[in-house]
Image (cartoon, rainbow, N blue to C red):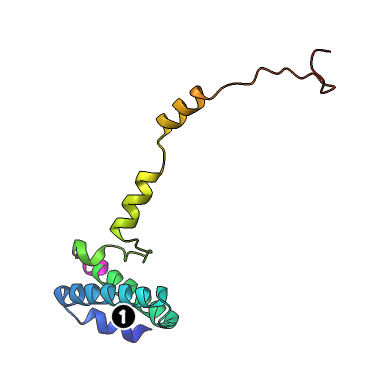
Amino acid sequence: MKENAEKFRALDPAELDKQLRDGAEQMFRLRFQMSMGQMDGVKKVRSLRKERARILTVLKQKGVAPSAAAAAPVPLVTKVTPKGVAGKRAAAKPTAAKAVKAAKAAPKKASKKTMSGKKGE
């Protein structure tokens, strides 16, 4: 473990920043492949996370802030729906205002039941 930190301490901040960006991109691709069921790269993802943490620690120790793109958290992969499907789904859902109007327009039943379940007792 100390070997990795020493390796990163020997690099200049620009090179560390570049490695941070490359690692983030690699992690994104691995997560994408895992979500598609193409591979089981749990060990690789874990090692990339640890490497990223080491790089950020070394940068903080040097007093250098990483670039915004490199320090941003790696996004999780989510399922993407095609544009046409999402648009149709959104149009099919009634809005709250339409639901209220429909409820007011529905005829109401005027039956009063007592505890026994019979009318008018």
The quarter of the displayed image where residue 74 is located: bottom left
Which residue appears at 33% of the width and 86% of the height? 3
Q: Which residues are magenta?
A: 60-64
**Residue 12 location (% of width, % of height):** 16, 77
Q: Amino acid at mark 1?
A: Ala
Which residue appears at 34% of the width and 54% of the height? 86
The quarter of the displayed image where residue 57 is located: bottom left
Q: Quadrant of the N terminus?
A: bottom left
Name the residue tied to disc 1: 5
Disc 1 packing (10 Å; few <14; some 14–19; many ≥20):
some
Q: Quadrant of the C terminus?
A: top right
Kindly give the residue lying farthest to the front in the view shown: 107
Is 117 located above or below residue 89 in the figure? above
Looking at the image, can residue 65 be seen?
no
Is 116 located above or below residue 80 in the figure? above
**Residue 26 location (% of width, % of height):** 29, 77
**Residue 105 location (% of width, % of height):** 49, 23
Which residue appears at 24% of the width and 69% of the height? 59
Compare residues 82 and 55 and report the one nearer the observer.
82
16 relative position to 118: left or right:
left
Which residue appears at 85% of the width and 22% of the height? 116
82 relative position to 15: left or right:
right
**Residue 46 location (% of width, % of height):** 41, 77
Compare residues 70 and 35 and report the one nearer the observer.
35
